[in-house]
């Protein structure tokens, strides 16, 4: 092939100075984040309303899943760097990821076990098993590819494209937030739709199915760009090397504890017999930062409750499915607050000559998160004041419904209660000697419009929305409908009935025994409100979301920047893995506290978490005060500039071997690039295989 052709191909490989391959990676990340956050946006509601789990157990499983998603990145990094390489790791784990999303969508199809066609699965065990398998595969997939995709995108740039590489990471972060924002808007809307073969129910299969489809798209897009990628071979995982170095230092120190062995300046110096001094110095720098990470999981323990406790709190507020969309406040505020912080707040603080160092920013971020939970507790106190008193597990609850035209006296325990005609009397407590069990009410209705029709008239067809049910002296429950019709057996016999519902309300509609069709048929239907509508507006949650997002921007973004600046050049991934591990530990903390605290009031649990974070914030502030900032590049340069006579004999051999290895790697890389330019067809085939 001529030099002109080679030059032409090389020119085609970039657009505006950017490798074409990165566009496939950005689109892949957008679709993958849409898939993950879309599924997660309705996950805790799926646990509560489809699988019928209580709030505490739904929260436990939710945070266990999130913790797994942030534990598996370590596994993904080791597999990518040690065996498969980034490309193959992303492809293989994306297949696992996609399979998990598909299984989750299947688990939410109520018709597969709804044999009696009443809209409720008859074999809940199967649905639970499928959902747990799906979540396990998703956690393995999303966590495994997390440390690989961004690094793989950085590998696509040449040394002279440093500016483009920096811009790529900004675009990459933007794609993450765009995917998150759109998915948390769309999937709750999909969940609110009704679908089903035998009976229409909330469409969780669609809410999970669309994220599964986006994951399929993400995988296809990534594979399509295969022939254009620059794929680096695995060269040994630095995480494994660091762990081995630390392990050897601990083991060697334990062997030489007697006083006859002189003490060393740092306990990591006990690895000097086997490992290079530069590596030991780098490990010291990493450990110094990791020590600061110890208090950080408490922040994530509060932050990730936005998707569990706060979502459940929203279901008791005044709104419709829009309450699901409150999670979109977080990505929207991120897109607004990040540039404001960088362009306005931080420069103003600098002009005031205040030393607002990264660690001080992180301390402020933790304090803001604690304030967010105090705000959530205040909202919860307002909500609790509007909720009815639900019976405990040791109490009974019943309704008396008077269907006769005269007043009756009901004796419940030691109390005589008059019951007017066509009215409902709710009774409860352990001393109730006689109660007609009608229906237990233990929580606010999910959709906010819950109606029970009690019919004592024979051969009357009840119609709500698209459902027709023949009710013969029984009870029919429906949701989210405000207009109903009752049809008789004869032609033209139809009564239209309309009842206005408030979000969170529950009504019992009594079809009286004297019901007749005609213009005044509505007067023969007696609505009785069992539960009043929610009165606390969901806008009250916005302050707590604002405080939490402001804390995230100050804490998380600054923490990533700090970790990067304090990490040695070849150990950025080590600190990235450590940072992700703090998220996992934070979710484990939620599980421990939620199970151990056993607080009856939700607002008290919010205050408990806020208090713990304030305490941890104080500890972190003290640790930050004694922290000395480092310049890793300067420290590494001191070791690189040492003269040969300053090196130990074993260091000379290792340094010489390292230089030879680097030289061979560079030559091999150049040769591979010359070969790839010589045959574009062969390169594409090798790319698919790689």
Image (cartoon, grey):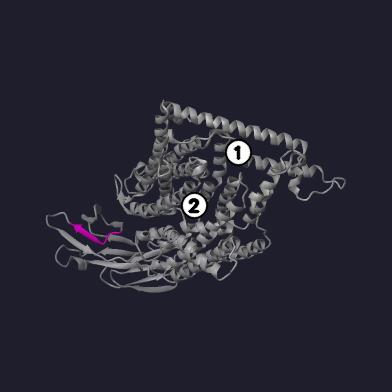
Residue 126 appearing in the image: no
Residue at 40 percent of width and 30 percent of height: 4
Q: Residue 62 bears which disc, if any?
A: 2
Residue 341 or 353: which is nearer the viewer? 353
Q: Which secondary structure type mostly characterizes the magenta part of the structure?
A: strand
Position in image of residue 336 (x %, y %): 43, 61
**Start and end of the magenta stretch?**
480-487
Image position of 192 (left or right of 238): left
Mark 1 surroundings within 10 Å by alpha-carbon count, few (fewer than 14), some (14 through 19), many (20 or more): some
Q: Is residue 105 above or below residue 431?
A: above
Query: In screen coordinates, is 416 left or right of 257?
Result: left
- Classify 662 as above or below 183: above
Residue at left 54%, top 69%?
A: 351
Image location of residue 432, percent across then percent down: 44, 66
| 252 falls in the magenta region | no
Residue 663 % position (x, y)? 61, 33
Where is mark 1, residue-wise?
Answer: 237
Side (left or right) of 299 relative to 324: right
At mark 2, the secondary structure is: helix
From the viewer's side, name the closer residue of 111 and 588: 588
The spot of residue 467 in percent (x, y) is 25, 52
Nearer the observer, 144 or 313? 144
Q: Secondary structure at mark 1?
A: loop
């Amino acid at each position: 092939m001529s030099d002109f052709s080679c030059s032409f191909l090389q020119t085609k490989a970039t657009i505006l100075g950017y490798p074409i391959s990165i566009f496939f990676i950005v689109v892949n990340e957008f679709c993958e984040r849409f898939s993950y956050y879309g599924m997660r946006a309705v996950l805790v509601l799926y646990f509560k309303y489809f699988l019928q789990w209580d709030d505490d157990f739904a929260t436990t499983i939710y945070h266990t899943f999130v913790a797994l998603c942030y534990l598996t990145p370590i596994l993904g990094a080791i597999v990518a760097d040690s065996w498969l390489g980034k490309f193959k790791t992303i492809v293989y784990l994306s297949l696992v990821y996609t399979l998990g999303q598909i299984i989750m969508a299947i688990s939410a199809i109520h018709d597969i076990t709804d044999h009696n066609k009443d809209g409720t699965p008859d074999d809940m065990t199967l649905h639970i098993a499928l959902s747990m398998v799906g979540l396990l595969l998703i956690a393995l997939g999303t966590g495994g590819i997390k440390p690989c995709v961004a690094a793989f995108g950085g590998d696509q740039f040449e040394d002279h494209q440093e500016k483009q590489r920096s811009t790529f990471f900004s675009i990459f972060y933007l794609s993450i937030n765009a995917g998150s924002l759109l998915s948390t808007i769309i999937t709750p809307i999909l969940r609110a739709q009704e679908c089903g073969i035998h009976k229409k129910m909330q469409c969780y299969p669609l809410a999970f199915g669309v994220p599964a489809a986006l994951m399929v798209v993400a995988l296809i897009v990534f594979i399509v760009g295969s022939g254009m990628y620059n794929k680096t071979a695995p060269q040994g995982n630095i995480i494994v090397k660091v762990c081995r170095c630390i392990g050897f230092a601990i083991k060697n120190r334990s062997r030489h504890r007697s006083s006859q062995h002189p003490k060393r300046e740092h306990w990591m110096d006990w690895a000097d017999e086997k490992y290079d001094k530069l590596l030991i110095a780098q490990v010291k720098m990493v450990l110094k930062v990791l020590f600061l990470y110890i208090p950080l999981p408490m922040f994530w323990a509060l932050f990730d409750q936005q998707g569990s406790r706060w979502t459940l709190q929203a279901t008791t507020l005044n709104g419709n499915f829009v309450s699901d969309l409150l999670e979109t406040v977080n990505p929207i505020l991120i897109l607004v607050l990040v540039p404001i912080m960088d362009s306005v707040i931080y420069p103003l603080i600098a002009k005031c000559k205040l030393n607002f160092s990264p660690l001080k920013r992180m301390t402020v971020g933790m304090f803001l998160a604690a304030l967010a939970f105090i705000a959530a507790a205040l909202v919860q106190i307002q909500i609790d004041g509007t909720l009815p008193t639900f019976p405990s597990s040791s109490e009974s609850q019943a309704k008396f419904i008077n269907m006769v035209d005269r007043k009756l006296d009901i004796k419940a325990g030691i109390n005589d209660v008059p019951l007017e005609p066509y009215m409902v009397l709710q009774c409860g407590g352990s001393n109730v000697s006689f109660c007609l069990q009608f229906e237990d009410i233990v929580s606010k209705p999910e959709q906010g419009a819950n109606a029970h029709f009690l019919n004592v008239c024979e051969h009357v067809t009840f119609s709500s929305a698209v459902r027709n049910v023949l009710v013969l002296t029984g009870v029919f429950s429906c949701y989210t409908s405000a207009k109903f019709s009752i049809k008789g057996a004869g032609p033209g016999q139809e009564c239209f009935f309309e009842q206005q519902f408030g979000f969170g309300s529950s009504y019992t509609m009594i079809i009286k025994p004297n019901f007749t069709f005609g213009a005044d048929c509505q007067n023969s239907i007696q609505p009785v409100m069992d539960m009043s509508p929610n009165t606390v507006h969901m806008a009250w949650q916005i302050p707590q979301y604002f405080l939490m997002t402001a804390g995230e921007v100050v804490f998380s973004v600054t923490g990533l920047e700090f970790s990067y600046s304090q990490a040695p050049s070849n150990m950025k991934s080590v600190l990235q893995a450590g940072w992700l591990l703090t998220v996992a530990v934070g979710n484990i903390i939620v599980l421990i506290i939620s199970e151990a605290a056993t607080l009856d009031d939700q607002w008290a649990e919010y205050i408990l978490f806020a208090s713990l974070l304030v305490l941890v914030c104080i500890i972190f502030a003290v640790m930050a005060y004694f922290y000395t900032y480092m310049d890793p590049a300067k420290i590494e340069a001191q070791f690189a500039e040492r003269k040969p006579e300053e090196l130990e004999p074993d260091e000379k051999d290792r340094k010489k071997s390292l230089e030879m290895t680097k030289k061979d790697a560079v030559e091999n890389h150049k040769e591979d690039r010359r070969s790839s330019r010589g045959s574009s067809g062969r390169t594409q085939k090798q790319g698919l295989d790689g």
